[in-house]
Image (cartoon, grey):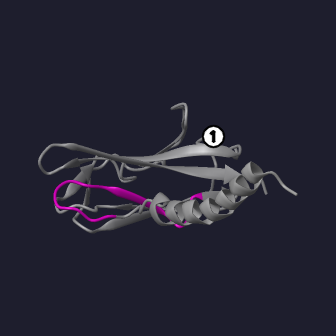
Amino acid sequence: MFPKGLTIAVLLGVIAGPVFGIILFEYGEEDQLIFVDGDSISIVTEKNDFKIGENISIKIINSGTTDLTFSDASYGLEIKQLDGILVFKPISAQMISLLESHEEFEFVWNQNKNNDEQVLEGLYKVTSNGISENGNTVTKSITINILKN
């Protein structure tokens, strides 16, 4: 009725699909927060995909064992388009901020640019830069996706 080659291909696809799905599900997810020895910073959001206009809670966490200092009270937070154009940087006092080991700073972004315009849907890079007590620059960035409603 059906050619042998077609039957074999369909059976392989039926078997391989769920197997690869399980593998990708188990190993495809990268944890946003991993504590390590030494200098480390993590950025955590409650999810990766947000509706346009939705508030986004961003946590900057010192995930290392050394204290981190920042040049301002926003803990080096910047939000950029993927092409590197700065979209948002919180207005903050120009004072040295300290984030001790395992300590965190939370910021809620309303998806507005620095000029108070709503950002468009697309991918955005959330970055934080600090300096460890050893003098090393510590940087972390994650990508979030803003979707149409």
Left or right: residue 129 compared with residue 108: left
SS for dot 1: loop
Q: Observer-nearest residue: 67 or 10?
A: 10
Residue positioned most to the right? 1
The residue sitting at 75% across, 57% down in the picture is 7
Look at the image and give the residue range highlighted in magenta.
34-48
Residue 45 x/y as whole percent = 50, 62
Left or right: residue 4 compared with residue 146: right
Residue 43 x/y as whole percent = 41, 57
Residue type of the residue flagged with mark 1: Asn
Residue 122 x/y as whole percent = 66, 44
- Is residue 98 found inside the magenta-colored segment of the image? no
Left or right: residue 84 compared with residue 43: right
Task: Tell me the quarter of the picture where residue 105 sits.
Answer: bottom left
Left or right: residue 148 compared with residue 93: right
Residue 51 seen in the figure: no
Residue 71 x/y as whole percent = 29, 45
Task: Name the residue beneath numbered marker 1.
Answer: 115
Magenta region, main secondary structure: loop
Task: Tell me the quarter of the picture where residue 61 sits.
Answer: bottom left
User: Could you tell me which quadrant the C terminus lies in?
Assistant: bottom right
The residue sitting at 67% across, 57% down in the picture is 13
The residue sitting at 41% across, 61% down in the picture is 32
Q: Observer-nearest residue: 102 or 32?
A: 32
Residue 45 seen in the figure: yes
Q: Observer-nearest residue: 131 or 41?
A: 41
